[in-house]
Amino acid sequence: MLNFELYNPTNYVFGKGQMSKLTDLVPQNTKILLAYGGGSIFKNGVYDQVKAALPATEIIEFGGIEPNPRYETLMKAVEIIRKENIGFILAVGGGSVIDGVKFISAAVKFDGNPMDILHKRLLMKDLTQVVPFGTVLTLPATGSEMNSGAVITINETQEKLSFGGSALFPKFSICDPTVIESLPKRQIQNGVVDAFTHVMEQYLTYPTDALLQDRIAESILQTLVEIGPAVVEQPTDYKLAANYMWCATMALNGLIQKGVPTDWATHMIGHELTALYEIDHARTLAIIGPNLYRVMFDTKKEKLAQYGERVFNVQGNSIEEKAEKAIEATVAFFHQMGMLTRLSENTEKYDGTADFIVKRFEERGWLAMGEKQNITPEKVREIVEMSY
Ligand code: NZQ
Ligand code: ZN
């Protein structure tokens, strides 16, 4: 097992009816910015619950944070905070709103061009240089409610870039599983596949001696396989909703990443497909992930075989046979979760995608990705072309 530090200061407040705790969780006598997305919170009652819990708080509202939040939109909120003497931000929404708020939080006091936070992938570590924030989660998927990372899209350059740092953990996150009742099926499917792939990025590498980490990762994967298809059909079933929400948080709150190598190349390539074609984040992962496992088969085959045996009960006479079956079981699960696993099924114009992505990665100096730093531009090309 590798050495590690585990730091996670987020107060994670889970369960039905927990919204009333907002009253005490937000700082008193502080003007807050309530940030939200396209308006789902007005239709499903979440906005009313938030307002009911904060009767005495001075609130300025900022809506319109898009899925795949845009730098250009977020900078408008930055201006409002600078002008209005706001001391706390409350993100009410899914990963996009929460990520957007992380960027806003980092940009308000940033001395320089805030775009550098993204282009230079700056690490925000100084708590005095960010605006504190909390979240009310409405879509289990990204883990953003309990981690310190975010992904922001710059419209002008069609780039989707990640950043973060230990100062960007939410102070608290209210996670009430009943919020999923109003989610479109597509978003629940996305949430399950995103969480599943987060685990894979931190687990499906090569064997280390992190026995407990493997078992924790496998238990999240098994739970998602067990409940994923059902929660899409029955979002009002509290048992399913609660387990789905907790799995999504556990998949990316930092715990399973400790002591092990990680990959993340599926995400890095997937972000390009969203930036280019607006394909939902999770759907890009379902397109790229299995082909990355195929192209990087020699690096990953031991872990693939273990995953196949433990998560999908595959059997075979060799590591290779089990590993191949594990990839097929993954694709079958993604199909069951409503994913279309070919790029051409998700966008009509995809010619030249591989060339574009390879050129971009080369320009950024991303020449060696993955747990063994052996995902070269040529491998990226092979993975993307295999995904057409
Ligand atoms: O904008 P509103 O009106 O709220 O509608 C949203 C949006 O249209 C809707 N929605 C959310 N909660 C709802 C609801 N509709 C009805 N009822 C509810 N309870 O769902 C749509 C999608 O929302 P979004 O926040 O975009 O989805 P998600 O949570 O999947 O977030 C995706 C974003 O997170 C990033 C992705 O790249 C993408 O930009 N990620 C962030 C990560 C992180 N911070 O650690 C890691 C992930 O890998 C991911 O990259
Ligand atoms: Zn993801």
Image (cartoon, rainbow, N blue to C red):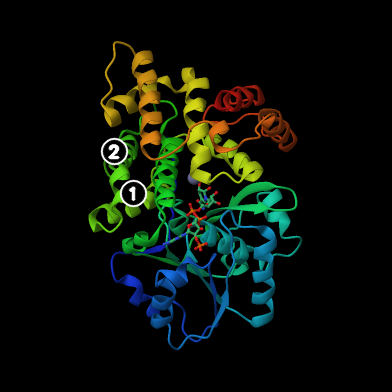
Residue 319 falls in image quadrant = top left
Q: In the rendered image, which quarter contains the C terminus? A: top right
Position of 354 compared to 258: left or right? right
Q: Secondary structure at mark 2?
A: helix
Residue at 69 percent of width and 65 percent of height: 110
Q: In the rendered image, which quarter contains the N terminus? A: top left
Give the residue pinned by disc 1. 232
Coordinates of residue 317 in the picture (x, y in percent): 29, 10
Residue 85 falls in image quadrant = bottom right
Q: Residue furthest bottom?
A: 56
- Within 10 Å of the Cα at label 1, are there few (<14), some (14-19), or many (20+) other Cα atoms? many
Q: Earlier in the sequence, mark 2 or mark 1?
A: 2
Answer yes or no: do the residues labelled 2 and 1 have beta carbons within 8 Å? no
Q: Residue furthest front?
A: 348
Coordinates of residue 381 in the picture (x, y in percent): 64, 25
Give the residue pinned by disc 2. 222
Count of marks overlaid on the render: 2
